[in-house]
Image (spheres, rainbow, N blue to C red):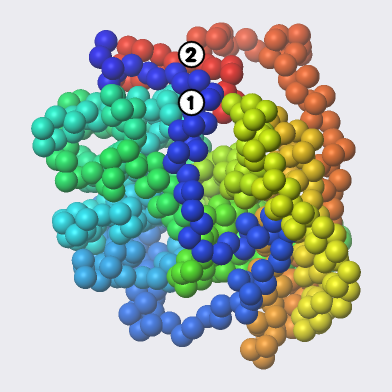
Amino acid sequence: MSDAKQQRVTTEQESREVAEQARQTEWEGRAFIRELYLGGLPLDLVHPFPTDEADRPEFRKFYDGMRDFLNNDVDSVAIDQTGEYTEAVIDGLRKLGAFGMKVPKEYGGLGLSVVEYCKIMQMVGSADGNIAALLSAHQSIGVPQPLKLFGTPEQKKKYLTRCAAGAISAFALTEPHVGSDPASLSTTAEPEGDYYILNGEKLWCTNGTLAELLVVMARNPKTKRISAFVVETAWPGVKVEYRCRFMGLKALGNGVISFKDVRIPKENLIGQEGGGLKVALITLNTGRLTIPAICAGIAKHCLEVVRGWGAARIQWGVPVWKHEAISHRIADMAATTFAMDSVSKLAAQMADRGGYDIRLEAAAAKEWNSVRAWEMIDQTLQIRGGRGYETEVSLAGRGETPIAVERILRDCRINLIFEGSSEVMHLFMAREAVDKHLQVAGAMIDPKNGFKEKAAALPKILAFYAGWYPPLWLRGLGTPSRYSEFGTLAPHLRFVERSARKLARESFHAMAVFQAKMERKQGFLFRTVDIVMELFAMSAAVSRAKSLAQAGGPEGEKGTALADLFCRNSSRKVQRLFRDLWRNDDDRKNGLTAKVMGGEFSWLEQGRLDVGLTPESFKTRFLTQDTEQEPRAAAGR
């Protein structure tokens, strides 16, 4: 069997090294969350909160056109039922220019800013998850964004113009045995004269069944380095092998794509050879901002539904919103929606303004908003009760308004997996958060280093921490009245500042205690990520509320009330997370899991219907290859 058809099974160390090599090693500007992790509160990076400027006439025309299109020409129920986008819908999006939203005007696109694009996707996300996924996969990780960032003038002229005209694109990284571990990539691109010869198979290629253009990740079988290429689906050897179907997003054009001796012209290499993973990671720094916007749109839809239903539904003689069990939920949902909207808007503005390194902010916005949206739609279904669980078709069939809850719940769940699962986002943020500490003290925890290397690094380490650690305690002496200009919200900013210093101390203490084992302490690391995401959301909400109050509009006082309730809830969550850093059952759970996986508790499964699952049932398989992937016990996800 040729190397192109062999499935790579890498060691844990090799996978880690590939991921580390793909990182952006330099920070391209200040980063709010990074400074939070180091114990600071760089308020100037998030305040004053960027105010909404008047819409450009061209943008307003497109926005209104998209709104009318969604209202008049998109039958979301039919799309969900048939599992297909109609030609009329695709053509309508093309005529609007929706596939060229982020393409510069010089290539025929609309040239929307990140903020404008996110406004569109928020509206689309509130209405139809299938349309949102189609546009998001194309704009955020498909051909337009990586070519904007890394493409040659020739590539941009050739392909961005096609995208602007309506050519759909997709991103192909995942394989049957490879998710977030690109070191195990099996698809190969072998140089041969003026071409690369592409062989392999990709799984879950969103838009792949519809796309004219693909961004494909493949490795050189000799150098093992991964590169990114623009591949045209009309080329010989490119084949859609299978259309995948899912719990939600029924029309998603997602499938298995195979490549057999596909000849890629060398000029279709994106960026540098061997730089494919960096292309993907840097593209996602702004590409991930689509999902927070979509999720904020979902939250706004949920709030409208529970507000309407809470007033209309009478139980025990009063509207259900007056029952405290429902009232508390609605209040929390309103406060959370304000925070989600603030996080999405702030991250988008950061991307537009430049001068920031938003890799952590984009990841936090994606992760935090997607989890909150899932909680919001779950609460909405609970408040709507049976009508939340009932389909729109059934509601309409018996004469009630077909309000979308059940469909949105199914469609929303994937956002915790799209563009980096929640677990991967936590790992990514945790690694980036300790980057400074690894730069300074990495030599002390590197298992490859001996006593001589560690001793040589010690003076530099002591010098840094002598200047960094004491202020994490001493700065607290000067904070009792800080941020007084924020009025009733000032205590929340002081909490954020205190918590940032505490987070920095606790992270340092953990590195001292766990040392080289720190990377295995995912329970601890994930809690620190959850803490910093809450602090980011609190900062965004407070800053936005203050800006609304200063603007003097009717939202000013109301924004303050929303931010205050959100921060009260969030601060209690942060306090619980801090407590759980050191007082938890992590080791006990690890031990129990080992016993479960060893079969010691298999008796718990007795009483189920035996459907014949065996170890063979859980092997991943290629459609176009004879090989199969054994589940790996060593390397976690």
| Foreground residue among 100 and 425 | 425
Q: Is residue 594 above or below residue 401?
A: above
Q: Specify few, some or many for label 1: CA neighbours under 10 Å numbering under 14, 14-19, or 20 or more.
A: some
Residue visible at 66% across and 48% down?
Answer: 460
**Amino acid at pointer 1:** Glu
Q: Is residue 631 above or below residue 450?
A: above
Would residue 158 be visible to someone looking at this image?
Answer: yes
Q: Which mark is residue 3?
A: none
Name the N-terminal-most of marks 1 and 2: 1
Instruction: Estimate the x, y position of residue 543 in percent, counting from the top left.
Output: 67, 75
Q: Which residue is mark 2?
A: 630
Quarter occupied by the C terminus: top right
Residue visible at 24% across and 26% down?
Answer: 199
Instruction: Estimate the x, y position of residue 266 in percent, counting from the top left.
Output: 16, 41
Q: Quadrant of residue 152?
A: bottom left
Q: Quadrant of residue 557?
A: bottom right
Question: Which residue lies most toward the left here?
Answer: 193
Q: Which mark is residue 14?
A: 1
Residue visible at 39% across and 79% down?
Answer: 60
Q: Secondary structure at mark 1?
A: helix
Position of residue 300 in the picture relative to residue 189 (left or right) = right
Instruction: Estimate the x, y position of residue 391 in percent, counting from the top left.
Output: 55, 47
Position of residue 463 in the picture relative to residue 178 (left or right) = right
